[in-house]
Image (spheres, rainbow, N blue to C red):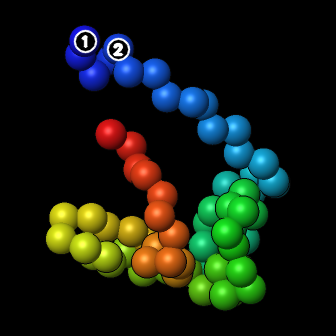
Amino acid sequence: AGPRARRRERVRLRGDLPDPSSPPPGCPFHTRCRHATARCAAEVPPLREIEPGRLAACHHAEELSLSGAA
């Protein structure tokens, strides 16, 4: 069984999809993120290495244990 044999549950995002011609301030994902805070709405998070070889652009990356794309 190869990597394609593994099935993953589809994630359905909720919230408002931002208008790409007039994106909201702050994190571009904050309108659809269930972990978003006031800081996310105000500040764009910088891309940074949160552990060796793992980058994230999220103010709360260290607090959350999220799995990324395989």
Residue placed under numbered mark 2 in the picture? 5
Kindly identify the residue that appears in the image at 31 percent across and 67 percent down. Answer: 55
Q: In this view, does 23 lie to the left or right of 59?
A: right
- At which x and y percent is residue 26? 64, 79
Task: Determine the residue located farthest toward the right in the rendered image.
Answer: 16
SS class, disc 1: loop
Quadrant occupied by the N terminus: top left
Quadrant occupied by the C terminus: top left
Residue 12's label in the rendered image is: none
SS class, disc 2: helix
- At which x and y percent is residue 30? 68, 68
Nearest to the observer: residue 19 or residue 44? 44
- At which x and y percent is residue 10? 60, 31
Residue placed under numbered mark 1 in the picture? 1
- At which x and y percent is residue 2? 23, 16
Kindly identify the residue that appears in the image at 66 percent across and 87 percent down. Answer: 39
The Cα atoms of the two marked residues, 2 and 1, are separated by: 6 Å
Q: What residue type is labelled 1?
A: Ala
Nearest to the observer: residue 64 or residue 20? 64
Q: Is residue 17 left or right of residue 6?
A: right
Q: In this view, does 8 lie above or below 55?
A: above
Q: In this view, does 25 lie above or below 11?
A: below
Instruction: Let me know if residue 2 appears in the view.
Output: yes
Neighbour class for label 2 at 10 Å: few (<14), some, many (≥20)?
few
